[in-house]
Amino acid sequence: MNVRLLKAKRIEVGLKQVDLAKILGITEKTMNHKECSSVNKFRANEMLTLSQVLKLSLAEFNSIFLTTAYRLFNYFKVFLTIKGGEDYKKIRERGWSSRL
């Protein structure tokens, strides 16, 4: 998780951790723990609420909440889908496409 970008966006919209904690329905201590952790500790509904409150673009959302490995995995999936070549057909035949 990109803690610096999350904090920068929070400050950009003029909110404090206590403000986001109230919006998310969590304590300030929990908000501090989640915001300062390099591992994403936010629940899906909390991430969606934060994206709305902080007015995050899709790119900012991905940069803040998704790991580099996850983003690379999805880019690889898109590449295979666009490529549509033999490799992708073999993956689909083996039933691996649901894992991509």
Image (cartoon, helix red, strand yellow):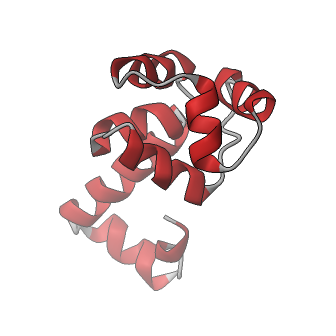
* 98 versus 57 height, above or below: below
Q: Is residue 61 left or right of residue 50?
A: left
Q: Would you identify the image quadrant in which residue 28 lies?
A: top right
Residue 57 in the image, given as x and y percentages of width and height: 27, 41
x 48%, y 44%: residue:
50
Give the percent coordinates (x, y) of residue 36.
Answer: 68, 20
* Horizontal and vertical percent position of residue 85: 23, 67
**What residue is rendered at 61% in x and 48% in y?**
24
Out of 43 and 65, give the one closest to the viewer. Answer: 43
Quadrant of the image containing the N terminus: top right
Residue 44's spot in the image, x, y percent? 58, 57
Residue drawn at x 37%, y 49% as measured from the top left: 52
**Which residue appears at 48% of the width and 25% of the height?**
6
Q: How many marks?
A: 0
